[in-house]
Amino acid sequence: MSIERRYSDYNKYLRSIYGQRVQKITVDTGLGCPNRDGTLASGGCIYCNSRGSGSGLFNKGLSINEQIEMGRRAMIRRYKASKFLVYFQSYTNTYTSCDNMKRMYDEALSVPGMVGMAIGTRSDCVDEEKLDLIAAYAREYLVWVEYGLQSVHDSTLKRINRGHDFESFKTAAALSRERGINVCAHVILGLPGEDRAMMLETARVLGELGIDGVKLHLLYVVKGTPLEVMWKNGAYHCLEQREYVDILCDFLELLPKSVIIQRVTGDPHPEELAAPAWSMERNETFKMIQETMASRDSFQGKRFSK
Ligand code: SF4
């Protein structure tokens, strides 16, 4: 069985809708995050890098259109791509007024070949007005909202200074889905204080919640973060590659097949990574996932029960 058939792979999902590969173009809008700028008292997620997972291109003066054009040209050259999806990745892409959100989304979706958008944000940075605006695009385009959740355990969310609880995610996910917006939850495996059972409980709860997609990440240590201090003084230990792969396979088995798996590994910048070194071996990790799923005859939904 191919890996694509062992779980509901995102690229395959896009191909099933558009009949061809759809290339994602990531943009950095320069919007901040209430958990970094002092609006929330929590002081920022303990693993957050200073770019908020963005490319930093906005700070280099590139507009949304310029960033998309740059990505689009590269995709056309490399893959002869003709369909694209814009991904608002960095920081919190609804942390602004509805007028500004509309300006950004209109600008991005006006690019030839753009079939949709994915908006990365926090569950405490949406409201009914913002979701109504996003839902209006969903009538014509493929629209996903990606909420950083990381864990369903409030004790963990507190420990990592997430600044919101699981209830906040549940509310935002329900308000989004009832408007026809696809909801993706970002989950991190290996968070401090979490054992295997807690991580798999996150899979069970999300499976029952009926969301549309999941992005799975490994927790890696970024230089200059509070997590690096914890790691250096022995208060935090990174997952081993083998552990990560085994937990990830268990996680997939607990999710219903309808959940689109958008990511199964992390993607650290080499210059900012403190640990673990194996997180740079993306191909090796992916190969281990394939081999492990095959040897266990594992597949998404194998242990899902409502
Ligand atoms: S929500 Fe994202 S950008 Fe904000 S502090 Fe957490 S990781 Fe950083």
Image (cartoon, grey):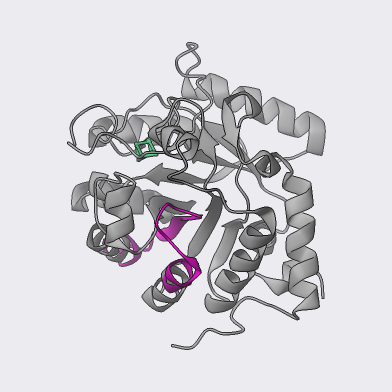
Q: Is residue 256 visible?
A: no
Which is nearer the eye, 232 or 180?
A: 232
Tally of numbered discs:
0
Q: Residue at x 72, y 46 (%)?
A: 282
Residue 104 location, x and y as percent? Answer: 39, 31
Does 176 appear in magenta?
yes
Which is nearer the eye, 75 or 17?
A: 75
Q: Residue at x 42, y 44 (%)?
A: 120
Residue 77 location, x and y as percent? Answer: 80, 29
Q: Is residue 137 visible?
A: yes
Residue 292 location, x and y as percent? Answer: 75, 69
- Residue 222 lies left or right of residue 135; in this view the side is right
Q: Is residue 24 above or below residue 32?
A: below
- Give the residue furthest to the top: 61
Q: Where's the C terminus, which quadrant?
A: bottom left
Q: Residue at x 45, y 15 (%)?
A: 59
- Give the residue furthest to the front: 233
- Residue 257 lies left or right of residue 200; in this view the side is right
Question: Where on the picture, by quarter, is residue 17?
Answer: bottom right
Q: Quadrant of ligand 1?
A: top left
Q: Which residues are magenta?
A: 175-201
Q: Is residue 104 above or below residue 297?
A: above
Does 196 appear in magenta?
yes
Which is nearer the eye, 208 or 141?
A: 208
Q: Is residue 267 above or below residue 271?
A: below
Which is nearer the eye, 168 or 200?
A: 200
Q: Where's the N terminus, which quadrant?
A: bottom right
Residue 114 location, x and y as percent? Answer: 57, 40
